Image: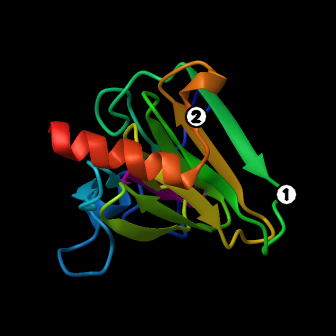
Amino acid sequence: MGNPARVTGYAAVPGSGPPRPASAASPAGSGAPLPGRTELGVGGASLHELRLFRDPRGELSVGELGRELPFTPRRFFLVSGVPGHEVRGEHAHRSCEQFLVCARGSCRVLLDDGHDRREVTLDRPSLGVHMPAMIWGTQYRYSPDAVLLVFASGHYDPDDYVSAYEEFRKLAAGRAVGA
């Protein structure tokens, strides 16, 4: 009763009610990823399982500033329409951090701190990767429908970019010595 109506469950879905995180509804060991953070062993980079809510209306992935997103974004951009054979990124930032989420489709991300490398596949909107400053990032193998959403900790500054890999390696080696 009442207008506007409020959905409290779905007749065709046993046990339905208000949406709950998919991982909370899944028993341990069911294969459903739990929200959380996994260190990748590359310059402080980490993989983040975002909270995911599912119901018959669709899915909702949630990331909050200060929780899943470890910095306050000053800029965001979307990368789309990338032919599968093309490579994007291929640079590092001196001070800017980034958080990447493939909002649609999939792509591979190569992270390199000048000493260690790690590849991850972003293939769902509930999975993101945090790239601290001075991580060489390369994105490739974009699916035809891929839309990569990137949050950046700083406004665009061309002087923040390190675009030559050899320069990056020298800077990374200097940071390792000074650490």
Relative image position of residue 64 (x, y in whole percent): 38, 32
The amino acid beneath tag 1 is Gly
Q: Quadrant of residue 75?
A: top right
Relative image position of residue 129 (x, y in whole percent): 42, 52
Relative image position of residue 174 (x, y in whole percent): 28, 41
Q: CA distance from mark 2 to mark 1?
A: 23 Å
Q: Measuring 18% from the left and 44% from the top, which residue is drawn there?
A: 177
Q: Measuring 37% from the left and 67% from the top, which residue is drawn there?
A: 117
Relative vertical location of residue 178 with respect to residue 142 in this rendering, above or below: above
Q: Which residue is mark 2?
A: 161
Q: Is residue 55 visible?
A: yes
The amino acid beneath tag 2 is Tyr
Observer-nearest of 76 and 30 = 76
Q: Measuring 85% from the left and 57% from the top, which residue is drawn there?
A: 81
Relative vertical location of residue 120 with respect to residue 67 in this rendering, above or below: below
Magenta span contains residue 155: no
The secondary structure type at the circle numbered 1 is: loop
Dominant SS of magenta comes to strand
Q: Which mark is residue 81?
A: 1
Relative vertical location of residue 67 with respect to residue 137 in this rendering, above or below: above
Instruction: Classify mark 2: residues with Cα within 10 Å, few (<14), some (14-19) or many (20+).
Output: some
Q: Quadrant of residue 134?
A: top left
Observer-nearest of 95 and 175 = 175
Earlier along the polypeptide chain: callout 2 or callout 1? 1
Q: Quadrant of the N terminus?
A: top right
Relative image position of residue 11 (x, y in whole percent): 53, 64
Q: Which residues are magenta?
A: 48-61
